[in-house]
Amino acid sequence: MNLSRYMIENIKYKPVTFFFVWFTSFTFFITPLLGALLVREIFIQLEGLVTVEVNIWFFVVALFVVNVFQIIFDVIWAILMNIFFMSLRLLFRRNMINGLYAQYGANPPPYPPGEAISRFRQDASEAAYFPVAMADLLNFFLFGLVSFLIMLSINSEVTIFIFLPFIFVIVLVNAFRKRVSLYRSERRKATGEVTSTIREIFSSIQSVKVNNAERNMLKHFEQKNNKRAQAAIKDEFFNSLLQATRTLIVYLATGIMFLMISEPMLAKEFTIGDFALFQYLLNWVTGFISYVGGSIARYHRTAVSYNRMTKLMRGRKESIPEKDIVQFAPLYLKTPFPPRTIPVKKSKDHMKSIKVKNLSYHYPDSDKGIEDISFVLQRGTLTVITGRVGSGKSTLLKAFLGLLPSTGTIWWNDNKITDQSIFRPPRTAYTPQVPHLFSDTIKDNLLLGLPDNSEQMQSAIKLAVFKKDLEEVEDGLSTLVGPKGKKLSGGQQQRLAAARMLLQESELKVFDDLSSALDIETEQKFWERLFQNNKDHTFLVVSHKPLVLQEANQIIILKKGKIEASGTLEALLNTSPEMQRLWEGKIEIDNYGIQDSS
Ligand code: ATP
Ligand code: MG
């Protein structure tokens, strides 16, 4: 999609506001034209070159009124322009966020946070200002055209001479446009790297300290800063050079114009009024020439910004169309955000069975992953995935839940699934191995926007064996946790995440290894209560705990990303050496026999 198409979409988003932005900008340009004509008239009157005499003060007052109007319209323009510009910028940001959320959840974001933030900040601003700048350009052009015609009618020779540099400037800027966008995108990239480094420094203070790496870290930071400084100087220097050349050429032409008009002035062919008009318009005309030059550069910078924004928005999902960056969406500027829509379970969400065939995923540039995994989950059963450390258990769950771009076929009941995003409540709920807590209260971390039902919450807390932890923290449910709050232990985090999951309505519950969450005693309680309370529910669980393995209706053993064996515990203990090893707890640390204790 090209820039003009994007611009049309932008204008369609807020057409009325945009029209008034254009109109107030138009009046801003009309006023100097009127002013110029009035000034000319004043001098003509003063020189006594007219037959009808009008009181000079009439023109003076008119000139004053015209200027007051210009100020008023300018203020209105500033207000409307900001409404238009900020709404559009917010829309871009919203669309980028939307794209980020459509990514595969377990894939890292397409760019590091600093880099992403610079796209949200600078690129969104650059692109949002573009339609405003183009409206100005159009008005500048109309104004320039009319000025040109007026000046032409007064003295064609001089006029043409003023407008000649205009062509030269356009040729000049066009010749360097590639460099303009290259320097700009290098500068943005370097800025993003600095922001990322700052973030990294803050999040790794402990590692830096224990490794005595302060000096190296500072050196690294300095390198990034130097790179940014160089890129910024290049960009700034080049832009200033272009700008200076533009101005220089224009002033040179103006100087020559002054030399040119001396003779006609002496011969009274060029009156003082004409001179005043030329002088008055000249500032604006030279401004116009600069603006055209600047606009060409702006056009290329905006193209770079759109490119960067769409890349962030689409990430690894090629299926997201580029034009989604300008798609319309409500922004809720005046009304509060709508509450979270709680999905209602429909009859087709009722699960009888899930069939998985040839599920595969490989991490990029790595042979690690899972391959050709097939299994069936029946309603009301417990399926346990087990295997050594690094055998691909978590990867399997993520690939199954659509959090990684896997291949293979999955059927929900007998319906083939085309969009794995159905693996969410009210169909499925998932507790990852390393759950994420937000910097917020325990309560909000549990609810995540669900309506506050204390009975349900208490039962989920009890079920997840989180009750005792809650009694131990100072402010109970109002305790702040997460990166900026109280640090919970790994086990506490897992129990909280499990309670959060149990609050979600779901047919299939997926747990990834709650081993650090529960000691043997509580574990027994946890699973007993869970199965008791949700007899009809289906569980897919990663575990190597004997207790869970004993309860399982089927066990899937993974080895190097493939199914090594599957079946009931009894059958596997008889037939699978891998199961026997796991059962006897002989495999302590991973890596395929390297550190087998046997
Ligand atoms: P654990 O018992 O430690 O939880 P797991 O069975 O869940 O291990 P996975 O996390 O699925 O193992 O990882 C399977 C393999 O893929 C491992 O060898 C791991 O090193 C590798 N792996 C995991 N994540 C990535 C990644 N983002 N990029 C490349 N390789 C990865
Ligand atoms: Mg794992």
Image (tube, grey):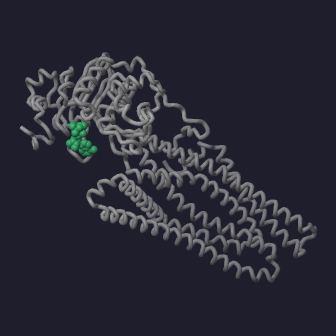
Q: Find residue 266 and report its image quarter.
A: bottom right
Give whichever of 515, 85 is nearer the camera.
515
Q: Position of residue 233 (x, y in %)?
A: 46, 69
Q: Where 477 sits versus 482, above or below?
A: above
Q: Where 472 sits versus 257, above or below?
A: above
Judge from the rendering whether residue 426 lies leftward or rightward of residue 376; answer left or right.
right
In the image, what residue occupies the spot 30% across and 21% down? 530
Q: Is residue 499 visible?
A: yes
Judge from the rendering whether residue 488 lies leftward or rightward of residue 300; answer left or right.
left
Judge from the rendering whether residue 335 lies leftward or rightward of residue 309; answer left or right.
right
Q: Dividing the image into four equal quarters, which quarter contains ligand 2?
A: top left
Q: Find residue 151 and report its image quarter.
A: bottom right
Q: Position of residue 117 (x, y in %)?
A: 45, 51
Give whichever of 129, 530 is nearer the camera.
530
Q: Residue furthest left?
A: 598
Q: Position of residue 403 (x, y in %)?
A: 33, 36
In the image, what residue occupies the spot 71% across and 75% down? 158
Q: Where 228 sits versus 267, above or below?
A: above
Report how many numbered discs are placed on residues in the image.
0
Judge from the rendering whether residue 278 lies leftward or rightward of residue 596; answer left or right.
right
Which image quadrant: the C terminus?
top left
Q: Position of residue 53 (x, y in %)?
A: 93, 68
Give whichever of 566, 309 is nearer the camera.
566
Q: Is residue 319 visible?
A: no
In the image, what residue occupies the spot 54% across and 38% down? 329
In the image, what residue occupies the spot 77% across and 66% down? 36
